[in-house]
Image (spheres, rainbow, N blue to C red):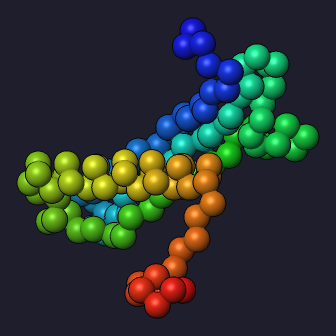
Amino acid sequence: AVGAEQVIYIKVLEFRDLVDRYNPQVQPQAVCHIRVIDVVNHLRLFPDPTTDEQAYPVLVVLQSITAESQRSRAMRNRVAELLAMRLGEETAKLFYEYNASKIGTNLDGG
């Protein structure tokens, strides 16, 4: 429908950004499955079609937060936005080479 030759298919399976009031410490998390489809040739390119893996899972877990820290709507929105951004970042890293470096190493040519 969009005229693309390849499509990145992302299916969000879980997006849990709220604190469970029965569990004082909870870790907000998001999970999605990713596939890359060659629309022209009707093939799955990623994950490798020769494997049994139908989709590639991406999981993001934020640090535990307390129920008190989510009493305001602004804080709940902030957690949801951070979770969504981290899920997007982790998904994007699948499609480019990413080298994490320690802070300051780029200053001395590292």
Spot the residue most to the bottom.
108
- Decide: is 100 above or below 3: below
The image position of residue 4, as x and y in percent, is: 62, 19
Total marks placed: 0
Spot the residue most to the front.
109
Left or right: 92 in relation to 43: left
Spot the residue most to the top.
1
Left or right: 106 in relation to 42: left
Residue 41 shows in the view: yes
Left or right: 96 in relation to 20: right
Left or right: 14 in relation to 9: left
**Residue drawn at x 37%, y 51% as measured from the top left:** 85
Asked whether 18 or 11 is in front, the reply is 11
Asked whether 108 or 19 is in front, the reply is 108
Spot the residue most to the right.
50
Task: Using the rendered view, name the quadrant where residue 104 is placed.
Answer: bottom left
Task: Using the rendered view, name the quadrant where residue 3 is placed.
Answer: top right
- Decide: is 54 above or below 62: above
Residue 20 shows in the view: no
- Decide: is 73 above or below 22: above
Task: Using the rendered view, name the quadrant where residue 33 is placed.
Answer: top right
**Residue drawn at x 51%, y 86% as measured from the top left:** 109
The image position of residue 54, as x and y in percent, is: 76, 37
**Residue drawn at x 81%, y 25% as measured from the top left:** 43
Quadrant holding the C terminus: bottom right
Quadrant holding the N terminus: top right
The image position of residue 83, as x and y in percent, is: 36, 53
**Residue drawn at x 31%, y 55% as measured from the top left:** 82
The image position of residue 40, as x and y in percent, is: 76, 16
